[in-house]
Image: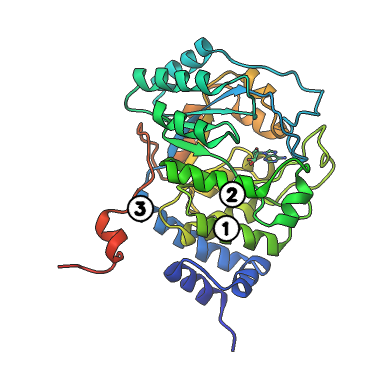
Amino acid sequence: MGKSMTDMVDSLEINGILPDEEMRELLKFRNKEITKYIFDKAYAVKEKYYGKNVYIRGTIEMTNYCKNDCYYCGLRRSNRFIPRFRLDEDDIMQFCDSGYKKGVRTFVLMGGDDYSFTENRVSKLISMIKDRYNDCAVELCLGERPSETYVKWFQAGADRYLLWHEAAGENYFRKVHPPDMSLLKRKQSLWELKRIGYQVGSGFMVGMPYQMVANVIEDLNFLKALEPHIIHLTPFIPTAHTIYESERSGNGEMTIYLMAILRLMLPRTLITADPALENVMADARKKAFLAGANEVFASITTDEIKEYYNVYNKKLSRRNTLGDEVSKMRLKIEESGNIAPSDKGDYNFPNEQETLYGKVHNIM
Ligand code: 5AD
């Protein structure tokens, strides 16, 4: 007799990995019972490493210029229908100030691949923020740069770097990106960022055109090997003026299910519940908090900037998130029975004994 789905989840929890055939079964035959079983386990594991904490990351969308042309993304350079903007240093510092007053202790500098934010310019910005707020983390989400730049920014004080791998399989990566993008380069950047000492974030979109179960398994296995400190999954959202504008959205429940699976694969990881979830499912982030997600983005800029930062269409989420996102997010977190501390919320690094001798052994 074959293994039951609950046996598979148990073994995933114990071993942190499943043979591909079993993972395929978990993904293909998802049902109510197994979903509840895995969500409860994922929440318990999150609680073990992070307690009731769910961290709010204050995002500053600082440029929507992008040199890339990814087929799915609203910021792609060939989209001539969106107005482009860049913030300057004064704006950014002002948003940090107001974010800080709201209790934000992680500032995420986010943008397209925009080289007018030069290595030097961003270094200065990072130092300025770190000088003013020594109890805060600076998290960068600024795309691919030469490794010297990653080093400079780390030396300037940046703590974390977010760079989604998007698609771990070569063929599938090729289908959804233009020929000038390289999966190998993306993966090399991620390993390099880890080596430099950043807390590194990676992830992928769920329900993308052409994505098959086998691709999702490749993505899970890649994340398991990389062991990023932060994992970010979002449902795919068809976006106006992109190649996939008339495709179907990704499934919200499936996205959260994959978050729960990843929580069991990489128990210490910070897992982000993306605002895009609300586009496909009501109250989705609250559900994600109960399935192992433990961080969330809240914009600390203005409604106008958020609107221009049109990575994906925001019809639904815009209605939900106008106004002060930080206090709204705090409320959502509390409604889910968790808390949102004013704390930079670093990755829960294992201590020396755990890494050298394995968690369960007492070395004395
Ligand atoms: N749907 C959802 N998320 C998107 N992103 C870009 N385009 C889309 C889309 N169509 C987000 C994803 C991706 C990052 C570059 O922007 O998180 O990883």
Residue 274 screen position, x and y as percent: 58, 40
Badge 3 marks a residue whose secondary structure is helix
Q: Is residue 208 visible?
A: no
Q: Is residue 160 visible?
A: yes
Q: Are marks 1 and 2 in contact (CB under 8 Å)?
A: yes
Above or below 173: residue 274: above
On residue 49, the disc is 3
| Distance between the alpha carbons at the discs numbered 3 and 2 | 27 Å
Direction from residue 81 to residue 61 in the image, left or right: left
Residue that protrudes farthest toward the left in the picture:
364
Camera-near label (1 vs 3) is: 1
- Identify the residue position indicated by label 1 in the image: 222
Which amino acid is tagged 1? Phe
- Ligand 1 lies in which image quarter? top right
Residue that protrudes farthest toward the top in the picture:
90
Above or below 233: residue 137: above
Q: Quadrant of the N terminus?
A: bottom right
Instruction: Mark 2: give few (<14), some (14-19) or many (20+) Cα within 10 Å.
Output: some
Q: Quadrant of residue 294?
A: top left
